[in-house]
Image: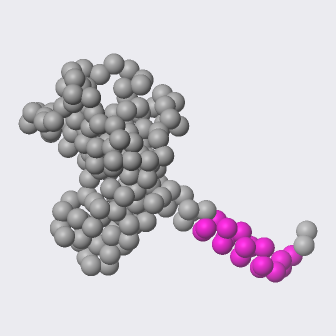
């Protein structure tokens, strides 16, 4: 990738930290997200971009995976692997970002401290998918904005161009 294209991608990723949508599972539960979790997504996206500057690949964050699985769990039953993945990621995100403020911790009877390699691969694929979807939405929005600007510029040119003939 050329330096100019890489710079453009890096800038797009930084802008995406603040403007990319929070992906939720379809079903109408996206408006129930706690505010602290939305803020956590922004913070984790910033951290992910900092890691990318050191050469790591950008993927979805733990908080984004937590939100997506949260909305899945409210919409439909999950199998045991996905339930454990959700409990693992929810506990990790909650205790890292909110437990100090709330004073609560993940109950021991549902706490998942470790995932199998199989489950971890599922989680990693989910995070990669989340990031790809974010980028796709961002690119579609950018294309629509450019098309709209182009159409507005053309309309302005036509409006300013003197009419040669009045019929």
Q: Is residue 152 above or below residue 58?
A: below
Give the residue displayed 73% in from the left and 73% down from the top. Answer: 156
Give the residue displayed 33% in from the left and 47% down from the top. Answer: 100
- One can see residue 129 in this view: no
Which image quarter: residue 42? bottom left
Asked whether 138 or 76 is in front, the reply is 76
Q: Quadrant of the C terminus?
A: bottom right
Q: Is residue 159 magenta?
A: yes
Please indicate whether residue 72 sits to the left or right of residue 35 in the image.
left
Which image quarter: residue 1? bottom left
Residue 163, x across and y down, in percent: 83, 77
Q: Is residue 51 above or below residue 20?
A: below
Please indicate whether residue 61 sits to the left or right of residue 147 in the image.
left
Residue 94, x across and y down, in percent: 32, 42
Please indicate whether residue 56 sits to the left or right of residue 106 in the image.
left
Q: Which residues are magenta?
A: 149-165
Q: Is residue 56 magenta?
A: no
**What colour-coding does the image apply?**
one colour
Residue 38, x across and y down, in percent: 44, 48
Q: Main secondary structure of the magenta part?
A: helix
- One can see residue 162 in this view: yes
């Amino acid at each position: 990738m050329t330096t100019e294209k890489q710079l453009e991608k890096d800038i797009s990723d930084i802008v995406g930290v603040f403007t990319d949508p929070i992906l939720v599972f379809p079903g109408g539960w996206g408006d129930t997200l706690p505010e602290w979790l939305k803020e956590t997504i922004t913070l984790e996206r910033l951290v992910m971009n900092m890691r990318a500057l050191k050469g790591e690949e950008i993927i979805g964050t733990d908080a984004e995976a937590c939100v997506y699985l949260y909305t899945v769990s409210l919409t439909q039953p999950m199998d045991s692997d996905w339930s454990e993945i959700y409990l693992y990621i929810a506990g990790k995100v909650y205790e890292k970002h909110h437990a100090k403020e709330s004073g609560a911790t993940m109950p021991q009877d549902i706490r998942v401290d470790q995932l199998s390699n199989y489950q971890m691969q599922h989680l990693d694929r989910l995070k990669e998918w989340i990031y790809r979807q974010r980028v796709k939405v961002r690119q579609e929005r950018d294309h629509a904005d450019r098309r709209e600007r182009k159409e507005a510029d053309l309309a302005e040119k036509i409006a300013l161009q003197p009419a040669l003939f009045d019929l």
